[in-house]
Amino acid sequence: MADLTQLQTTCIQVRRDIVRMVHAVSSGHPGGSLGCTEFLVALYNEVMNHDPKKFTMDGIGEDLFFLSNGHISPVFYSVLARCGYFPVEELKTFRKINSRLQGHPTTHDNLPGVRIASGSLGQGMSVAIGAALTKKLNKDNSIVYSLHGDGELQEGQIWEAAIYAAANKVDNYIATIDYNGRQIDGNVEDVLSLGNLAAKFEAFGWQVIETEEGNNMAAVLEGFAKAKSFIGKGKPIVNIMKTEMGAGVDFMMGTHKWHGSAPNDEQLQKALDQLVGNEVDY
């Protein structure tokens, strides 16, 4: 079991990776990546049963994760690399020509840790449900996890999948919603309000839990534990996790403007000055 302080230190390193990767190519999505750092660090270092050294596409006997909001690839790549799926040095190739680390994760370059191409929003829940049903058919007791942006829930396919999962009692599946209230064009509430999200999922037949502090590692771990307590009880599980876009870098917080903008040299240094720990940058 990982130490809480160790997990928090890993978050600092991952956030440093995120801002450096996006800065290096003046392209990418730092805001949501920073906001989901605790989630992915906890998932891969503490929660999931997985083996980076024995990665296979089918993932038999392992927990699986599907990133639906694929634009937050910087945090995904950093966590995968820091867990040992591929060399940390490869983070230098982010978004470059012929790199395996494209802006949205892809499968054609066989990057360990990536099982679906993602970035076209709304599709990840359908894939995750299919994987979860496959595990049930194979009598594989592993758990399937997915992550979605709150703005992504404006896609109709999400709700078709939600109906299907409940109707088919896909109770080995935990979906998490990154509920930061912001998307590329502004506040989610202003673009297209989601209303009472918990009530919606409950009406669709899901078990709902809420994590109020998605950038607090202890709270994130508690949320995972609570979600897992409902595995096998007849309902798919959704964790509505409140985060802050740009968390960890003060000038990136409180706004949607860093959804898809890269820091310049001065801004990068300012960010790195705030992200200090036992970092070992690539």
Image: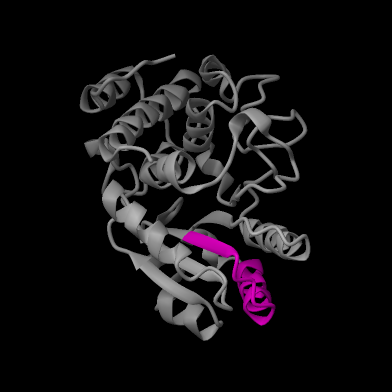
Place residue 107 in its image quadrant.
Answer: top right
At horizontal 39% and vertical 16% (from top left) the residue drawn is 281
- Residue 37: percent from left, percent from top: 39, 41
At horizontal 63% and vertical 61% (from top left) the residue drawn is 125
- The foreground one among 219 and 75 is 219
Place residue 232 in its image quadrant.
Answer: bottom right
Tell me if 31 is positioned left or right of 63 in this view.
left
Give the colour scheme shown: one colour
At horizontal 56% and vertical 55% (from top left) the residue drawn is 146
Image quadrant containing the C terminus: top left
- Residue 81: percent from left, percent from top: 53, 26
Taking the magenta stretch, the answer to whether it contains residue 62 is no
- The foreground one among 59 and 275 is 59
Tell me if 252 is positioned left or right of 41 in this view.
left
Range drawn in magenta? 156-176
- Residue 180: percent from left, percent from top: 36, 56
Image quadrant containing the N terminus: top left
The image shows residue 274, relative to residue 180, as above or below, that is: above
Whether residue 181 appears in this view of the structure is no
At horizontal 59% and vertical 28% (from top left) the residue drawn is 85
Whether residue 81 appears in this view of the structure is yes
- The foreground one among 13 and 227 is 227
Place residue 152 in its image quadrant.
Answer: bottom right
Q: How many numbered circles does the render carry?
A: 0
The image shows residue 85, relative to residue 44, as above or below, that is: above
- Residue 155: percent from left, percent from top: 60, 65
Tell me if 122 is positioned left or right of 196 in this view.
right
